[in-house]
Image (spheres, rainbow, N blue to C red):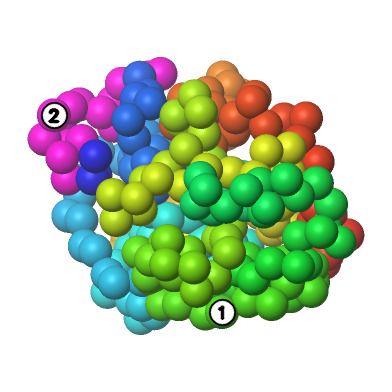
Amino acid sequence: PRISRILEEHPDVCERDDFFSDEWLRTSLEFVLVCRAIRLGGLDATYSIHSFPNSARTRDELLIGRIAVMVDLPWGDFAAHESLYRSDAVLRVGDFVKGVYTRPDHTELLKVKTLQELRNFTAVSSDTWVYDWAALQRMKITTHSAAKYELMGRMVERGRADFLVAEFPGASDLSQYINGFRFIPVPGIKVALPGSRHVAISRRAPHAKQIFDAVQIGLKSLRQRGLIKKGYQTVGFLNPLIEDWKSLCCDDMS
């Protein structure tokens, strides 16, 4: 469910300690982690949620201070921008892994076990998803760019690309639906993105330094009690099912 619906159904979600739902998306979980951190850091905040068509636009809005915090947590190099406060890492280097997702009937691709074999197939991603794009380029995969996730799904569904690199969902069979169409991961392989993810607070937002100080205190408390890990495990992002899968990339990328 979207963040606004979570706030409607669980108005005290930012005050509860270790309540997480396997129905949440990663971005919804990250909002909950941020709002709990702010609360634990001593601020009693209210939230208005704004949505933008893609992450590039959201980053622009954050830099000019039209929004205070971006809840699809950005990568560390962006969060280090001089217009932002950057928190300690929420997801550390190597935590962010994705699967190679394709149509259930793409039998040739579903047999792939090595990077060499994967290079025979084409990917679709967005060139604004910096780490995804860099990983695919590093892997020497022919990649088409699409602006939105729905369009990526459509390209794979219609055979204009063989796969997209996507987050593993909480479903026990690791399948996911885009535009109502089912996609499954190539079993046994994954892609580890090389960056860390942080809370980024616009220095131009009201009370920015107070928010940043609260976030730092709160994140430290959440991590010490294992609640960051528990949250990501609950939504399927840190998934024990794929722990032993072979990573085709990109441990040595800087």
Please report the residue visible at 24 percent of the width from the left and 64 percent of the height from the top: 51
Left or right: residue 139 compared with residue 156: right
Q: Residue at x 49, y 24 (%)?
A: 172
Whole-percent x, y for residue 112 in the image: 76, 49
Q: Secondary structure at mark 1?
A: strand
Q: Residues within 10 Å of mark 2 (few under 14, many from 20)?
A: few
Q: Are marks 2 and 1 in contact (CB under 8 Å)?
A: no
The answer to whether residue 123 shows anywhere in this view is yes
**Magenta residues, start to end:** 4-18
Secondary structure mostly taken by the magenta-highlighted segment of the chain: loop
Of badges 2 and 1, nearer the viewer stands 1
Residue type at the position of mark 1: His
144 or 34: nearer the eye? 144
Q: Nearer the viewer, residue 202 or 49?
A: 49
Query: 225 left or right of 18?
Result: right
Q: Quadrant of the C terminus?
A: bottom right
144 lies left or right of 138: left
Whole-percent x, y for residue 37 in the image: 42, 37
Measure the alpha-carbon separation of dots 2 and 1.
Answer: 39 Å
Counting from the top left corner in percent of width and height, residue 221 is at 53, 28
Q: How many marks?
A: 2
- Rendered residue at 50%/74% (across/down): 160
**Is residue 150 in the magenta section?**
no
Asked if residue 96 is positioned above or below residue 241 in the image, the reply reads: below
Residue drawn at x 72%, y 30% as measured from the top left: 243
Give the residue at mark 1: 144
Residue 222 in the image, given as x and y percentages of width and height: 52, 28
- Residue that carries the numbered disc 2 in the rendered image: 9
Residue type at tag 2 = Glu
Q: Is residue 202 left or right of residue 198?
A: left
Residue 11 - label: none
